[in-house]
Amino acid sequence: MDVAELGSFLKSRRDRLAPESVGLPPGTRRRVPGLRRDEVARLASLSADYYTELEQGRGQIPSAPVLHALSRALRLGPDETDHLFHLAGRPAPYAARPPHLQSALRQLMERLEDTPAMVITDLHEVVVQNHAAQVLVGPQAGLTGVRASFLHHWFTVPATRDLYPPEDHGYHSRLLVSDVRAAVARRGPVDRASGELVRHLLAASEEFAGLWRAREVGARHEEYKRIVNPALGVLKVTCNSIVTADAAQRLLWFVPDDPQAVPALHALDPADVWRATPGPAFGLPRSRA
């Protein structure tokens, strides 16, 4: 915790706010720019003395609810809120906003037209896929809640595992759990999305529960995997990744061993490939045949 910088940051954000922007009367005898300390305290439902101690670099370390209250009172943006939490020695509240495609990854995606690529969050929620990736692994974007995470489908929907050969299932289970454990620790105990996902999986899957108790941790980087595609059969691919600075999102791209697979991925329609096949194509209706 950097108490001096925390106090300076709070003061700088207070100074920039006009009273009328937060629903307070402007008044005629203000001697400071922006809001007064007591006004910030009132907006955040804190005592004026406690808020004054924070600005002066004294007092107790603020809790996560207090930091959220200060963020709302001071009208902080997402990056400013993360910074506030970091200064207080608290994990940044990643789940305070829904997943969105970060601009740096968007720019990279646009340059990967010939390569199957997708962006996922650190909880394995698919944010976006290009056409070739939808053909390769099935359309997976657009879901919400715990169903948005690939881990939900992997550990609770058996047909999802048709995406990989049966002898590879144990490897992927261990890798998924060790990767998401690192994400959960990084997000911290106050993060609702990761906590909800873990509680859901602990109750729904004995396999997940056993792997979770093993406490293995390992982030995914370059992987060599086999993907079972309904139209193209078993494809051997190298899966590479680039992680954003906040580790909240990663760009995945797949390089097939067989170069002839790439034009085939562009020529096929993902709806034709996955609709009639029970498996991990979450974004398409399943056939009832």
Image: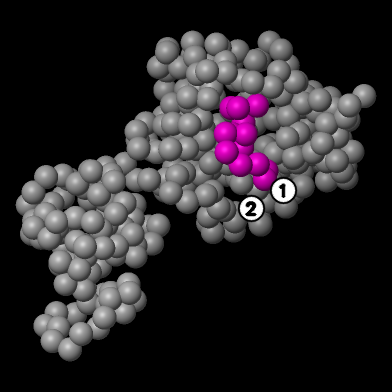
Q: Position of residue 21 (x, y in %)?
A: 34, 76
Give the residue at x 57% y 15%.
205
**For mark 2, what is the residue?**
109
Q: Quadrant of the C terminus?
A: top right
| 38 or 286: nearer the viewer | 38
Q: CA distance from mark 2 to mark 1?
A: 8 Å
Give, as a three-letter code, the residue at label 2: Met
Marker disc for residue 263: none
**For mark 1, what is the residue?**
130
Give the residue at x 23% y 43%.
63
Give the residue at x 25% y 58%.
44
Q: Position of residue 103 (x, y in %)?
A: 54, 59
Under tag 2, what secondary structure? helix
Q: Quadrant of the N terminus?
A: top left
In the displayed structure image, the side of residue 235 where residue 127 appears, left or right: left
Secondary structure mostly seen in the magenta stretch = helix
Crowding at dot 1, Cα within 10 Å, few <14 / some 14-19 / many 20+, comes out as some
In the displayed structure image, the side of residue 238 where residue 86 appears, left or right: left
Crowding at dot 2, Cα within 10 Å, few <14 / some 14-19 / many 20+, comes out as many
What is the magenta range?
Answer: 141-153
Total marks placed: 2
Quarter-of-image position of residue 214: top left
In the displayed structure image, the side of residue 201 where residue 279 appears, left or right: right
Can you see residue 144?
yes
Give, as a three-letter code, the residue at label 1: Asn
Q: Position of residue 277 (x, y in %)?
A: 85, 27
Q: Position of residue 237 (x, y in %)?
A: 69, 30
CB contact under 8 Å: marks 2 and 1: yes
As for residue 44 lying within the magenta part, the answer is: no
